[in-house]
Image (cartoon, grey):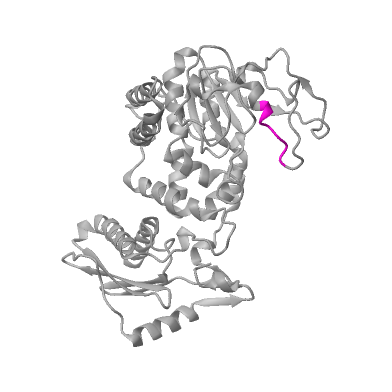
Amino acid sequence: MNRFESRIGIFVVEPDDLKLISQHDVLQAALTDRLQAIWSRKFWGTPRDETFLRRLDFFPSLSESIAVKKWSGGVGLQPYYPGISPGKPKPLEPWSLSDRFLSNDDDFPQLVLQDRDLTTLEKGLENSVHQRLQIRASLTDLRRKPPDTVFKPPMVVFSKGFTKCAFYKGSNGEVRFLDGLRSITGEKRDVDLLRFLSAAISSRLFKYISFHSGSNLGVGRDQIHLYESLALPFPLPDDELASRHALELVRETANILEGLERNIPDRKRLESTIEAMKRCQPLVEQYFSVTDAEKILIEDTITLFQPSVHKRDINADIPSLAFPTRVARQAYADKLCDVLNQRARKQKIKVSAEARVSENLNLVLLTAMFTEKQEAYTEVRGEDALWVALNRISKAARKDDSMFSYLRGFKYFEPDRLHILKPATMRNWCRTAALNDADAIFEHLVTENA
């Protein structure tokens, strides 16, 4: 729905909301254990996103790399709440209440975990209270008691929604944690690769993949299942599909994280972590050979689409439905023209764009002009008669059915120009939309010429 229809309870279904899934794709996904990803990829993903994600599917999965390296890990422990928790409790012993414990709270360290971030298992269980009945956890029993290999460093610890992730080198025994966290543990010889894995899981790229591939994250609950996280791409440096600079990228990333492992004062730690994450982002993207166009897909997903889900208040600001600013409209037009000009350079055609905007009608009309000289993007004021006609076209291009209003796309080709009319929402006028519109326009022109 857009910013108008949401107030009167009408669900607007735009052309991009209508997705087709072939039987072949369903069967292929079932055979490769990726069935859960089909719905999520169609829900928010554009054709460009699906192409990008299919490319990443060719990489070995994290579970395959874990098997090759003989790593371990798993989900953390579950407290036992007397009188509430089902099943027979498991004794805490031979574990000790003095065992080190990592809390899954707002103070969770990012990228690197240090000894000062840990408390005791006793304190962790004392702080575990049943949310509904306010009953404290047992200090002598557990409901779920994973093997020690789950808690043995060196390891990477991350949360269900990939919002938290840290590497811990450690040398003083196991570190316990609750089932809201998961671990991947390895041998000391693999510390650099585990450091890189921590940076990868913390990266915008992995947040992008999990948003589009998890069965919950982009649709419902803010989490992904363990089997979904293990299905994420993670080629080892010696894999045939890995970057030829993979080892150097791993070492460079590991050096950045190793710098954070030093005893940085608390007042500088957050600043140092943010700086380290900024330095790691391009290294992770280079490891997966992410192109400039794919970086746009990641950027729009993280800043536009992901913040648009999990809204409890229908009147809350939804980034993907916001009215596009002048800067956003120009960014769309520049990217559209850039892609079309690259593809039409042999024909010596230059594509320029101008737009007409009506905030009252919630419409933007963009005209792409095919000439011999490229001009800068401009916006012109449309005549009143034009907006009356466009409003008529917009209404005629929709089909209302009770609570649902189905919109149809409107593109009109002339010999030397193309007119695009779309609702004025950011989802329609972001750079991801420009990439997909450029593909559709080019495909149409090629088909017409053929």
**Which quadrant does the C terminus fall into?**
bottom left
Residue found farthest to the bottom: 385
- Residue 4 magenta-highlighted: no
Q: Relative to residue 401, is residue 196 depicted above or below?
A: above
- In the image, taking residue 124 as reference, residue 410 lies left or right, namely left
**Nearest to the observer: residue 425 or residue 76:** 76
- In the image, taking residue 209 as reference, residue 325 lies left or right, namely left
Residue 406 percent coordinates (x, y):
55, 72
Question: Residue 338: which quarter of the image?
Answer: bottom left
Residue 174 percent coordinates (x, y):
59, 16
The main secondary structure of the magenta stretch is loop
**Nearest to the observer: residue 49 or residue 198:** 198
**Nearest to the observer: residue 288 or residue 96:** 96
Q: Relative to residue 59, is residue 167 depicted above or below?
A: above
Residue 361 percent coordinates (x, y):
43, 78
- In the image, taking residue 310 as reference, residue 202 lies left or right, namely left
Q: Is residue 156 visible?
A: yes
Residue found farthest to the front: 267
Residue 61 percent coordinates (x, y):
51, 31
Question: Residue 18: which quarter of the image?
Answer: bottom right
- Start-end of magenta stretch: 125-131
Q: Is residue 235 visible?
A: no
Q: Relative to residue 315, is residue 185 depicted above or below?
A: above
Q: State the count of labels.
A: 0
